[in-house]
Amino acid sequence: MDIDQLRSFDRIVRDGSFTKAAARMNVTQATISTRIRTLESHVGGTLFTRGRKVELTERGATFLPYARRVLATLLESEDALRNVDRGRIALASLRSLVDPLATPPVLDFMRAHPRVELLFQEGRHRDIAEWLHDRRIDLAIMGWPNFDPLLETLEPIAIIREKAVLAAAPALAREIGPAPTLDRVFAVAPHFLSFYWWQVTPDAVTSLRHRARTASEVLFGSGRALIASGDAIGHLLEAGIADELARGELVDLAPIDMPPIWRDSALVAGASDALSRPLVAELADRIVARASALGVLHADRR
């Protein structure tokens, strides 16, 4: 029994597929299969039922928590050795919060500590959850609440709450008119967009998709360009477009019959003792201070 076998076992459980696990681990499916067969010989029986859907056997389900305990201990030791000099920090952020929230404190931190190695990654919520599970990052800005069963003990350092405004280009907003109803908005708007940055799409947004003449779910950059050009409307996070709203380049339609819509996210630590490292604690403080300055700090749990 070795670590590669345990990692392969855990990866198959998480992906529900030998093929996907092999792709994630950058090895062949034959290699994955060989590792599992060898592991099964050590534990005295099959770990998975193999068919159209890969599922754990009773033996596999019993073995899983022990395998993950070994992997967690290994990851903790690797992290401790890698950061023994306290000169390396890994941060991950939701893509939609990289520019307004994460980047300014990161720049200030790097100017204050030019010799510290910083790994700064962006991704969707599920990417960040994977990185946290693999102990690859020290701090993360991720969707909240957390529904990932692999991260059930995760506690937030701070909760960030952003207002989502129904945004439009100025010309389209003038055509719709001031203080519109949703009926008026959708009578004029050519296209309604929603984005992948909702961890759980609010019911209000889902209902708007059904009212729109045409609705699409698109990547943030493309959607923002379509809204700015007047080809669509969609909910954008107020903090991220504050400058455009102030300059009149975008308009908050603010329909009189639409309830307020918010998105929650959280700053979390990759390990329970991460904030005991002064540099990690300092970067967390800078991010929380930035959230407060933007007016999106909903709760400080430090």
Image (tube, rainbow, N blue to C red):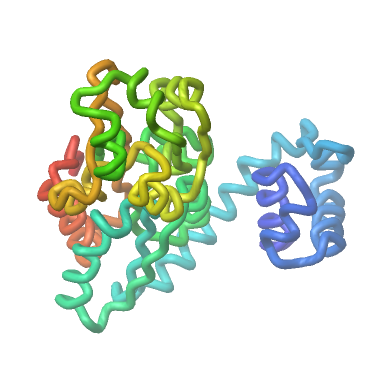
Kindly give the residue lying farthest to the left in the view shown. Answer: 293
Q: Where is 51 relative to 5, above or below?
A: above
Question: Residue 243 at x, y = what percent?
Answer: 17, 53
Q: Where is 28 relative to 20, above or below?
A: below
Quadrant position of residue 50 = top right
Q: Specify whether residue 96 is in view.
A: yes
Question: Residue 234 at x, y = what percent?
Answer: 38, 37
State the residue at coordinates (12%, 46%): 292
Question: Residue 280 at x, y = what percent?
Answer: 25, 62
Quadrant position of residue 299 = top left
Q: Can you say which quadrant of the picture contains the C terminus? A: top left
Question: Residue 186 at x, y = what percent?
Answer: 40, 25
Q: Can you say which quadrant of the picture contains the N terminus? A: bottom right
Q: Where is 24 relative to 151, above or below?
A: below
Of 155 and 190, nearer the camera is 190
State the residue at coordinates (29%, 30%): 176
